[in-house]
Image (cartoon, rainbow, N blue to C red):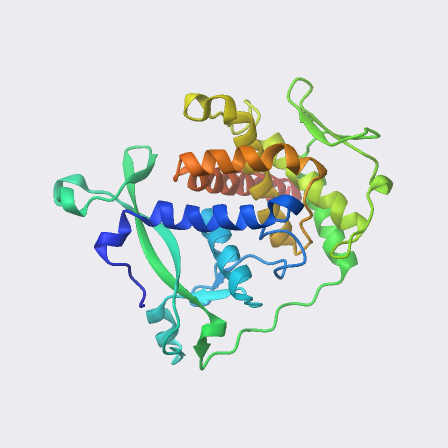
Amino acid sequence: MHGTVPSEAKSDVFSSITSKIVSAIESGAPQFVMPWHGGILPPTLPVNAATDKAYRGVNIVALWVDAMSKRYISGYWASYKQWQTFGAHVRKGERGSIIVFYKPLDQPELGVQDAAPVEEQRDSFRFVARASHVFNVEQVDGWTPPVPEDKSIVQINEEVAAFIEAIGADVRHGFHGARYRRDLDCIEMPSPEMFIGTPTSSPVESYHAVLCHECVHWSGAGHRLGREFGKRFGDKAYAFEELVAELGAAFLCSAFRITNEPRPDHAAYVSSWLDILNHDTKAVFTAGSKAQEAVEYLTTIAAGNTSA
């Protein structure tokens, strides 16, 4: 299967990707171990081998799920044609992984039969979802991934600590649990020494993973991104915000190459996440988009304060 998806399959891109993610959550739900948690995949974001850019939003999750199910240890992906530009080739019989991308929708030039569901609207531009297939480097012959920069745990922890300081969040320690308080606009955290290590993470990594989760909540305050979900999710809006924070923390942890550990209170949300995703095939796309927006907002603030 090559890089593009037949037109009859394009309208099903939302349900196809959502069903894979739901299956991955269900398979890990009893232990609250999602595909993006530590111990299953390398702690890195999936990257397009041709552009050297990380994938975004729900495509990160979709590629993590496929990498987990197929046991790929490399995070490099590209389309059939992109691999050809390297002189590499996808091995016969290999099947691609579906990703989604958005193109501007020019309605006067599109017939009804050509229109896919509109997922986003930005200013006066409307975007239409299109599906494509990409292949992992482990499905390809003729290309060797670059050797990643080798950073020590100390370096990584210093980078995360500097990032947290640079975003300017009011982080307070000494509490029994972790949460973002909108009424006080602060993050409450247990003391760092209260965190313990696991088979896949150090105590410091566990602490940072939880703190990243709360920082995503912090980004959604009304005077920041103003993240609200309204009637579409009704009484599930709180659980949906937790899914956004879960994904955002996973994206941040992968960017920093620290292990993303499941929060102790995941049990309260897993069933709600599944209920939302099973009833709304576009929900995970919205969650991925909002998580990506939060991460970019936080990294922009950090970069600005660091360079000032």
Q: Which residue shows up at 28% across the image and 37% down it?
A: 125
Q: Is residue 149 above or below residue 176?
A: below
Q: How many marks?
A: 0
Q: Which residue shows up at 69% across the image and 40% down it?
A: 263
Looking at the image, the residue that sits furthest to the top is: 183
Q: Which residue shows up at 37% across the image and 50% down it?
A: 16
The quarter holding residue 174 reads top right
Residue 34, percent from left and from top? 60, 49
Residue 25, percent from left and from top? 55, 46
Residue 139, percent from left and from top? 45, 73
Looking at the image, the residue that sits furthest to the right is: 193
Taking depth in this image into account, of 47 and 245 the one nearest to the observer is 245
Taking depth in this image into account, of 181 and 53 the one nearest to the observer is 181
* Location of the N terminus (image quadrant): bottom left
Q: Is residue 250 visible?
A: yes
The quarter holding residue 301 reads top right
The quarter holding residue 151 reads bottom right
Q: Which residue shows up at 46% across the image and 65% down it?
A: 77
Q: Is residue 279 left or right of residue 144?
A: left
Q: Is residue 45 above or below residue 12?
A: below
Residue 29, percent from left and from top? 60, 44
* Location of the C terminus (image quadrant): top right
Q: Is residue 13 above or below residue 96?
A: above
Q: Is residue 226 visible?
A: no
